[in-house]
Amino acid sequence: MRRSVSRIGLAFLAAIAPLIFAACSSDDPGDDGASDAASAESGQTDASGTPATGGAPADMQAQVAVMTELQSINQQLVTIRDQAFERPELQAQEKALREQVQAAMVSINPDVLQLEARFEEAQAEFAAAQQAGDQEKGQTLMAELQTLQGTLQQLQGQALEQEDVAASVETFREGLFAEMRVVDARSDSLMSRAEELNEQLQAAVPANMGGAEDGGGGR
């Protein structure tokens, strides 16, 4: 089963393959924010961290259930991916791809390395500010980090759109998916299910926003 870049999307690629910018992503490459979104949707979690749905409307409970299933699938895919990455050839391909993307980003903006260095420095400064209880400095650094992350992600996106880089990404993806299928024959079905769940969540967001606006306009 062949999947195009547009079909999976760069966000899903980031969820299953640590391409670049480890500093700009979570420590767990498989964390796509589903758990945070679920918590925000329900407003609370139970002691185990599972989104609580007691008393929530049926549609909200359904969304939380989708998010929970998506998180579970992503965790399974991360496990499969990690096992696939034990193959030395795949590690070498991933390293070459990161270097190619990095070079493309530098060609777009020569200050990329300085931006990355400042991002790492700001992260350390933010952690120190938190530890010292300096909220004002922490807020300033958080704003800087968000700006830097946005800039770096934009440059990364531009680099990934370059024809030669996109071709390398597709080759790497095909190799990764092939190795994941060797590790676990369910990989295709898990990825397909994850796509379906993502589409359900995306479709639900406009509906919820529309309902909120209608409810507010009735006064």
Image (cartoon, rainbow, N blue to C red):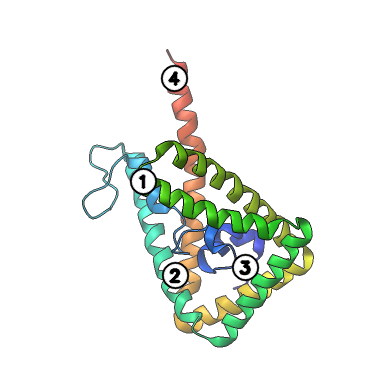
SS at circle 2: helix
Depth check: give the residue in front, 145 or 86.
145
Q: Are marks 2 and 3 in contact (CB under 8 Å)?
A: no
Given residues 12 and 87, the one toward you in this image is 87
Calculate the distance from the C-alpha at mark 3 to the C-alpha at mark 4.
42 Å
Q: Is residue 147 above or below residue 123?
A: above
Closer to the eye: label 2 or 3: 2
Position of 11 with respect to 208 (left or right) is right
Q: Which residue is mark 1?
A: 132
Q: What is the distance, in whole Å, between disc 4 and disc 1 at their CAs?
A: 42 Å
Q: Earlier in the sequence, mark 4 or mark 1?
A: 1
Inter-mark Cα distance, 2 to 1: 35 Å
The answer for how far apart the CA atoms under marks 4 and 2 are is: 41 Å
Quarter of the image that includes the N terminus = bottom right
- For disc 3, the marked residue is 3
Question: What is the x, y in percent for residue 126?
Answer: 46, 49
x%, y% of residue 202?
51, 46
State the SS at label 3.
loop
Residue designated by label 2: 78
Q: Which residue is mark 4?
A: 216
How would you rate the neighbour count of disc 2 (Cα within 10 Å): few for under 14, some for 14-19, many for 20 or more? many
